[in-house]
Amino acid sequence: MSTQPQGVPFTIDIPLEKVHLLQQKLALATLPDELQDAGRDYGVPLADIQRLLARWKDGYDWKKYEKHLNDELLQFKVPIDVEGHGLLNIHYIHKASPVPGAIPLLFVHGCK
């Protein structure tokens, strides 16, 4: 009998209210002027940020990509006790490699 916690299947389901709230916040965003000839020395160029902001606000079909991720990836959550932080509910994707003997990878993110 294993004492390791078992993963529980997980499906991405972002409420439309949260998507609409994000779109409202993006519509209210104010961006600074860009420094002349700064390149990438001070971060991402303003034009790139403006393009991304417009895409996320008006041109990104959140539910379409949510469905795509849910259809393509086996997702799970598993509780892991982390010293100093307590029990964390870790989200992970199980995707086996078609390459025999491939080294498993673990990507961890900080989103709740």
Image (cartoon, helix red, strand yellow):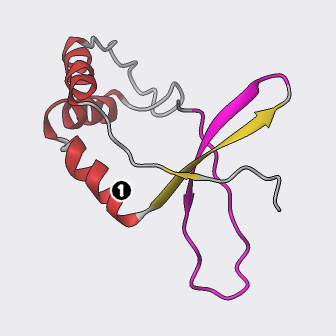
Say whether residue 108 is left or right of residue 35.
Answer: right
Magenta span contains residue 97: yes
Q: Secondary structure at mark 1?
A: helix
**Horizontal arrangement in the rendering, residue 13 relative to residue 112 (left or right):** left
Left or right of residue 41, residue 38 in this image: left
List the single residue furthest toward the right: 83
- Front-most of 43 and 19? 19
In the rendered view, tell whether residue 89 sits above or below residue 92. Answer: above
Query: Is residue 66 positioned above or below 68 on the image?
Result: above
The answer to whether residue 105 is left or right of residue 70 is right
For the N terminus, give its image quadrant. bottom right
What's the amino acid at mark 1? Asn
Residue 34 image offset from top left, x and y in percent: 35, 19
Q: Is residue 25 above or below residue 15?
A: above
**Which stretch did the figure color magenta?**
84-110
Q: Quadrant of residue 45?
A: top left
Residue displayed at 24% across by 34% down: 56
The residue shown at (21%, 51%) is 64
**Which residue of the protein is positioned furthest toward the left in this rendering?**
58
Q: Main secondary structure of the magenta part?
A: loop
The image quadrant that residue 60 belongs to is: top left
Residue 40 image position (x, y, % from top left): 49, 34
**Residue sticking out furthest to the bottom:** 100
The residue at which mark 1 appears reads as: 70
Does the magenta run of residues contain 102? yes
Pick the front one: 40 or 65 = 65
Query: Which residue corresponds to the image point at 35% horizontal and 56% vertical from the top-left?
Result: 70
Residue depicted at 84% across the width and 22% down the height = 84
Residue 31: horizontal and vertical position, in percent?
31, 14
